Amino acid sequence: MTDGTATRNLYRPKLLTTFKEGYSAVLFRKDALAGLTVAIVALPLSMAIAVASGVSPERGLYAAIVGGAVVSLLGGSRYQIGGPAGAFIVLVAATTARFGVDGLVLTVLLSGAMLTVLGLLGVGALIRHIPHAVTVGFTSGIAVTILASQIRDLAGISLPGPEPGPLLPKITALADAAGTAVPAAVIIGFGCAAMIFVLRRLRPSWPGMLIAVTLAAVATSLLRLPVETIGSRFGALPHGLPAPHLPAVDLDLVLRVLPSALSFTLLGGVESLLSAKVADGMTGRKHRSNMELVAQGVANIASALFGGISVTGTIARTADNVRAGASSPVSGIMHAVFLLAFLLVAAPLAAYVPLSSLAGVLLVVCWNMAEKEEFARLLREWRGAAVLLATFGLTLLEDLTTGIIAGCGVAALLALLRRKTPEEP
């Protein structure tokens, strides 16, 4: 069996390659088990990401179900799991706050169209050449920003007005309102995070996130704890997917959301190909980068038509998929089927989930997202540190796009200076 190197530039979904090579009932059982394993992880995480992004939790599930299925149907990786990702929380929240949910859905739709075009133009190979220090810088910057955005729900803090978007005003406002924190919310939030870390250490095969969120919901309901839940803020989750429909489109709104759509496109392309590369490293296979971009684009278009948020390749869930024994993209399709089954059968149970427990889940996500060891290693070499800090700082203080552009600019300038500097004898 080849590793896929010879065909990595083809515009052919890996699912078709899998069936062409031969697919058996034994492989399906392996894929179904892996899909169930990933769905158990994706269920609380998709809702947590949606809530943190300023939208109702079902929109995260729509993205995981519809977008995840399309990524596996059309994608250029055998193991990629598509869905909402923590890296998008900052962008989605800012877009929702500025343009509303309709503007967000339009942004996701436009981003999907751009990703599809980029894939058809063969840009996938270029995206993979973004400097490593830039990737570490913006990933760590996003992790810090997400962490700051979860303090309010993690502690049950009440603010007199809307929560500021920029980092420094946000921290100031939360510090001023710290006296309104609810002790029960703090205990639930940090307790969930601690339980996930402990289970990951002692029982790595157990679904720590789902166990922690479930126990938090049971405790909140039985003890009647005074904490906000999904039900109290958003109401009950719907039973199933909505009918697909186009978002409201007018030229003025398209022009206003276009910069956000470009940011979504840039992050989506980088994140999805990084995730596919991680799967390659774990399996020895080679993904088809341009086909993967096309799939991510179509997945975002499909997610938008069903009212979902942005979709990308998810590194942690893809790695879980590989570890669970997946053999083909069928596992990703099954992950979407299992999530849909939850929405059809058990959606009312989500109303009892405390928001502080979802914030605890994202606290763990932030810890895992920040590449702490790589950050420290890059700081020890001045060129890497310059690129890293430019990206990290501007991602925190401005936005993701500014951070990536600045980091790539610094990296290009340093490369040019190095080329012009004569070698020492």
Image (cartoon, grey):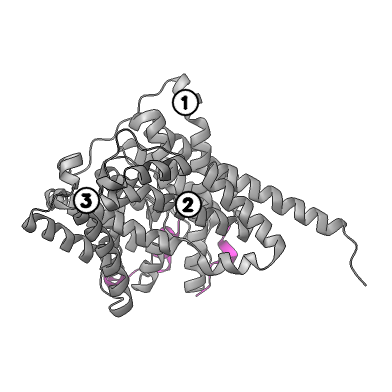
Query: Which residue occupies 42% across, 20% down?
Result: 250
Q: Amino acid at mark 1?
A: Val
Q: Which residues are magenta?
A: 1-30
Q: Amino acid at mark 2?
A: Ile
Q: In this rendering, is residue 178 above or below 94?
A: below
Q: Amino acid at mark 3?
A: Val
Q: Is residue 418 left or right of residue 243?
A: right
In reply to whether residue 322 is colored magenta, the answer given is no
Query: Which residue occupies 24% across, 35% down?
Result: 243
Calculate the distance from the C-alpha at mark 1 to the C-alpha at mark 3: 41 Å
Question: Which numbered disc, 1 or 2, marks the residue that appears first in the sequence?
Answer: 2
Calculate the distance from the C-alpha at mark 1 to the C-alpha at mark 2: 26 Å
**Mark 3 closeness class: few <14, some 14–19, many ≥20 residues within 10 Å:** some
In front of the other: 163 or 146: 163
Q: Residue furthest right?
A: 425
In reply to whether residue 3 is colored magenta, the answer given is yes
Q: In this rendering, is residue 176 above or below 46?
A: above
Q: Which mark is residue 182?
A: 3
In front of the other: 370 or 312: 370
In front of the other: 238 or 118: 238
Q: Nearer the viewer, mark 1 or mark 3?
A: 3
Task: Give the x, y percent position of residue 140.
Answer: 51, 57
Q: Quadrant of residue 234?
A: top left
Q: Which mark is residue 142?
A: 2
Which residue position holds label 1?
254
Question: Which numbered disc, 3 or 2, marks the residue that appears first in the sequence?
Answer: 2
